[in-house]
Image: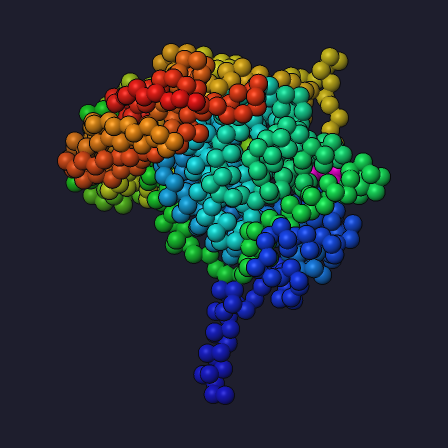
Amino acid sequence: MPKYALCLAALLTSIFAATGSVAQFPGMSSAKHYAWSDKSLSPDARADMVIKEMTLDEKIQLLHGPGWQAIFAPQESGPLTRAIAVLGFIPGVPRLGIPDLQMTDSNQGISMAGSKGRYATALPSDEAMAAAWDPELSYEIGTMLGHEMRAIGFNMSLGSGINLIREPRDGRTFEYKGEDPLLAGTLAGQELKAEKALHLITDLKHYAVNDQDAGRIVANSIISKRAMRESDLLAFQIALKDSGAGAIMCSYNRINGIYACENSYTLTDVLKKDFGFKGFVVSDWGGTQSTVKAAMAGLDVEMPGNDSFGAPLKKAVESGEVPMDRLNDMVHRVLRTEFDSGIVDDPPQPESPDVMRGFEVAQKTEERGAVLLKNAANLLPLNAASIKSIAVIGGHADAGVLSGGGSSQVSPAGGNAVPPPPELMKNPLTAFMLLEVYHRSAPLKGIQQKAPHAIVKFDPGTDPVSAAALAKSSQIAIVFAVQHESEGMDLKNLSLPDKQDSLIEAVAAANPHTIVVLESGGAVLMPWIDKVGSVVEAWYPGIRGSEAIANLLFGEVNPSGKLPITFPMSESDLPHPVHVDPPKADANHPVPKLAGAPGLIGMAMGIAPSFDVPYDEGLKVGYKWYDAEKKPVLFPFGFGLSYTTFAYSGLKIAPGDATTVSFTVKNTGKRAGSEIAQVYASLPESAGEPPNRLIGWSRIDLAPGESKQATVTVNRDRLMIFDEESDSWKLPAGQYVLRAGSSSRNLPLQQTVSFEK
């Protein structure tokens, strides 16, 4: 063969290996043919065929993540050597062609990629995704995430998180999709539907009522069945129906006195029976507290952090405490999910990630998810041609954009843009929660590129006097204010930390043309709101935050995001003005003995005396609370401004099993823009519901002066209530008021219709 041909052959081999045409990850199913390799058989039939060939030890192995021990005793041989991330690994059964489960968190990107030196796109936070109110974008996000997971070798996604924001000081609000079950469930459903289409096992978490992180291992969420079914559990129900997710992760907390991972009501009665869930329930890490009770209540798979489903489960099966039928059901659920998802027939192949595609999705998400909260005198968008000087202040805007911490943390490409204090990194537990990671996407650079003829100067904002001086000498002042959140802790309050309120006050006093860009995980208080010109909620903006924020500030993109959460006026207006903190241990409040790893996980995740978190607001989650209690808010659910304006008219309602709500939206401004038109319902008084309930929405793109008809189809289940006495959903008979508008508190159109049972 000629020399050039040999070189070409080598090159092609390299390319094919990189794209997965030649190479294959270890631990994936082999090409060997088995009776259950027949794709024409149902996933259930294939699973049953495999189970007949399995030994007891192989069944137990499939239900237990062994990776915890490997942290303290690295493995030189055995299944764990095949793990991409040892804490997200469950060995398969190679002799039967059953692949390893390789799991990764994927809420805002592939969190475990960095452990193998691989790149993963850092997306904006889940709150930003939710603020886009865009199911098609959520599907696009899921597609991008799915491709990146497969490229690295993961075959199971540990996202999406859809706990509702009952407690806005929760340290993980940035991982969740807002305070409404329809919004959160719909968006999560589309994201996971896209991932499943790429042959991945998908997962919803944290099931359920895990609505604060402080003391989550010992917290007892007290809530009525009706409130659960119409709020927290409804979000899971909607997402499961839309996505066909293969796994549900149970949470750490107790629910009405019983741990979520051994709660037969939520796991079996609701999830497996009422929802018809055929997949498997997986514990959170260190989240199981028993063997027999958990297995019989509905837990199927235990992840690392404890050892309830290893040798103890085998012993319980051999003694008959856990019947073989139940063990086989647990194994069946795992196997049928593997066949149903496609990971057996189409395992991941190694390839390079599509970095540019990730950039595109990350930037689009931020541009659609950022919310314009205030824009006095049309200060925004900025006109680069007329601006001579800009002061950029605070938030490490010269270096990067902030991200949320914990297990969902995506490794920053090139390292942390803001080096952490060395003393923080000495304690991995403290670093897990307190480390502030900034992605290398500096807003300062984006602003400089948009205003090349202006003098753009940066001040770190650590000295309000210095910052005010720079602001006073500049035509425009842009303050970047940050609020860090992380798994494992809750916020002390909703105020901006590190005296940033005082900084904003000083800058605004020096320059009336002050713009505040918030990088936060959720709602913040704004005592300075009347003193600044414009406010943009950018959330945690992701790897293309600089470009997206600059496009929004300078009008290349017209803001269209709407709040997925309510911003309260003050913490005194919250359902729980005082955060429910874990009590300190004493003779009357001893620390409980937990089956999970008592050291590392306990210290990081909040072991303390058990305590109750009474969610006595019940059905009134988020905007429903403020509406029912007639409380004013800083910014309502569904709110978001644009650089143009919209008008609503012509409401028409056609009642039926699928009620059609239609109306006209007109762009009354001079710029093209997108409006998210929302539809709410007030149920009959006999229903005992809060005043308003989101029942649908439509995203409409409009040119200046253009009108379009918005049509929202409302199925009857969106109008139903859960009746505890009959343990069923019912449609209250009577008059319903349906409203349409731009937010939960701006609904200019309304019409009354009647429904019978």
| Residue at 64 percent of width and 53 percent of height | 45
Q: Residue furthest bottom?
A: 1
Above or below, 651 relative to 359: above
Q: Residue furthest front?
A: 756
Looking at this view, is 696 or 346 the one in front? 696
Q: Is residue 307 magenta?
A: yes
Q: Which residues are magenta?
A: 305-309
Above or below, 299 relative to 752: below
Looking at this view, is 476 or 588 the one in front? 588
Q: Is residue 145 magenta?
A: no
User: So how many labels did they put on this image?
Assistant: 0
How far across and down, in percent of the image, does residue 202 sit? 54, 45
| Residue at 43 percent of width and 36 percent of height | 186
| Residue at 64 percent of width and 25 percent of height | 254
Q: Is residue 665 left or right of residue 242?
A: left
Looking at this view, is 245 or 155 the one in front? 245
Residue 439's image quarter?
top left
How far across and down, in percent of the image, does residue 108 sit? 47, 42
Position of the C terminus, as image quadrant, is top left
Query: Taking the image as drawn, is residue 485 in sight?
Result: no
Query: Taking the image as drawn, is residue 192 in sight?
Result: yes
State how the image is colored: rainbow
Q: Is residue 511 left or right of residue 658?
A: left
